[in-house]
Amino acid sequence: MRKACIVLPTYNEAENIEILIPKIFRAVEKLNNWEVHILVVDSLSPDKTAEIVKKLMKKYPRLHLLVTAKEGLGKAYIKGFNEAIRTINPYLFFEMDADLSHDPAVLPNFFKQIELGADFVIGSRYIKGGSIPKDWGFHRKIFSFLGNMIVRLGFMKLKITDWTSGYRAIKSWLIKSVFDHIKNYSGYVFQIALLDQAIKRQAIIKETPISFQNRKKGVSKINFSQYIFQVLIYVFLNSSFIKYVIVGFIGFFIDFALSYTMIEKLHFKKESFWLVTAISAEMAIISNFILNNYWSFSYKKLENKVSTFIISFLKFNFVSLGALIIQAFGIQILTNFFGPQYWYIYKVLIIGLIIIPYSYTLYNKFIWKNK
Ligand code: GDD
Ligand code: MN
């Protein structure tokens, strides 16, 4: 029998928690392989949520309560995980809203995915079978969709459809291994940081559909503009894709500056322009290789072995050569079709639409490998 612990953060959820807790225990009753506990993490709710939990604890021996200061959703989860690891030591954790937005009836689907090998299961509103409330206004829909899109594109992880969902199952070892990275995110952005770090630890991520319900009692505690701002900052600072694009720009400037210096300042003869070009391009390639290894893909940087470095650097040059060939042919083909006057548009299009995804994919497949 494995232990699972559902962490329920609450701030003024007295009316909801009373209904939710019996529902959860009923939903997991038939699971033979799991001993399910609930830990309510209450931030000193003035509506006496904790009193109701204490009352229910008499009936449910696997119901636990942790009372903390009000420091945001992320902090509540961090403290909850810590406490549960110390006292219950579960194999699996759940995150779940306590306002009845997340239906406990689908809990067995999460367990099933875990039993099939997933490390992290996301309850998604955006895959087949999932849904958002029909009465969400246009703004809220657009907001939620765009927010998710920004994160999906920023991290180039399009397969994950619901980055911001708060209904998830996560294996305990994973929580422990990312703990130091996530413990400083106190607000709702914590959810995104946790998922991002899990991906960077090569966790197996799966999604299961959920139908998100509007809360009927109490009010939401999210501050949307602050949330969006924190998400944007997080993505910008932690996306290897964005860093990779920045590295590409740096490479371009190195290439250009070196050629410029050698031609304009050092007065290299025109017969050696090929050499000037080759030297500057190779310097840019070296810079790209180093910056990508120690910055963009630092979480999966190359093994510290000379042979690994040499082989990877050769592969890197090979990919760069491919990029050069694609660009050369692409520009020529477009020029033949649409005329030479738009050459710079062709260049931007080819780099943006072909070279950037091409190199990024090959780096991830062959140099800084994903599982
Ligand atoms: N202990 C504690 N401390 N609990 C909190 C705090 C806090 O500071 N802030 C919020 N909570 C609890 C709420 O009581 C609720 O059970 C749960 O966290 C979710 O909070 P809501 O206020 O209902 O959030 P929401 O419905 O607006 O936000 C939804 O979208 C977010 C972003 O997509 C939720 O699904 C979140 O989980 C999700 O991250
Ligand atoms: Mn809610």
Image: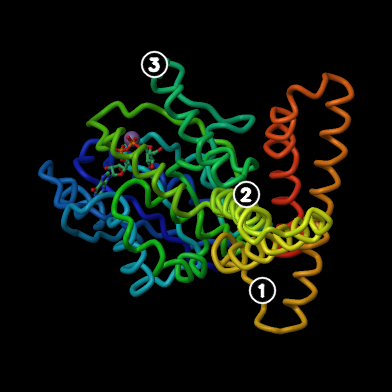
Q: Earlier in the sequence, mark 3 or mark 1?
A: 3
Q: Point out the image quarter for the N terminus.
A: bottom right
Q: CA distance from mark 3 to mark 2?
A: 29 Å
Look at the numbered disc 2 and give the secondary structure of its residue: strand
Residue 112 at least partly seen: no
Q: Which mark is residue 116?
A: none
In the picture of the structure, the residue carrying the numbered disc 1 is 302
Residue 354 at least partly seen: yes
Would you say the residues marked 3 and 2 are in contact, meaning their CB atoms lie under 8 Å apart?
A: no
Q: Residue at x 68, y 64 (%)?
A: 283
* Label 3 C-beta lies within 8 Å of the nearest ligand 1 atom: no
Q: Residue at x 46, y 41 (%)?
A: 165
Up-down relation of residue 267 to residue 218 (above or below): below
Residue 301 rendering spot, x and y as whole percentages: 62, 70
* Label 1 C-beta lies within 8 Å of the nearest ligand 1 atom: no
In the picture of the structure, the residue carrying the numbered disc 2 is 206
Look at the numbered disc 3 and give the secondary structure of its residue: loop
Q: CA distance from mark 1 to mark 2?
A: 27 Å
Q: Residue at x 88, y 38 (%)?
A: 329
Pointer 3 local density, CA inside 10 Å: few below 14, some 14–19, many at least 20:
few
Which quarter of the figure has residue 214? Answer: top left
In the picture of the structure, the residue carrying the numbered disc 3 is 137
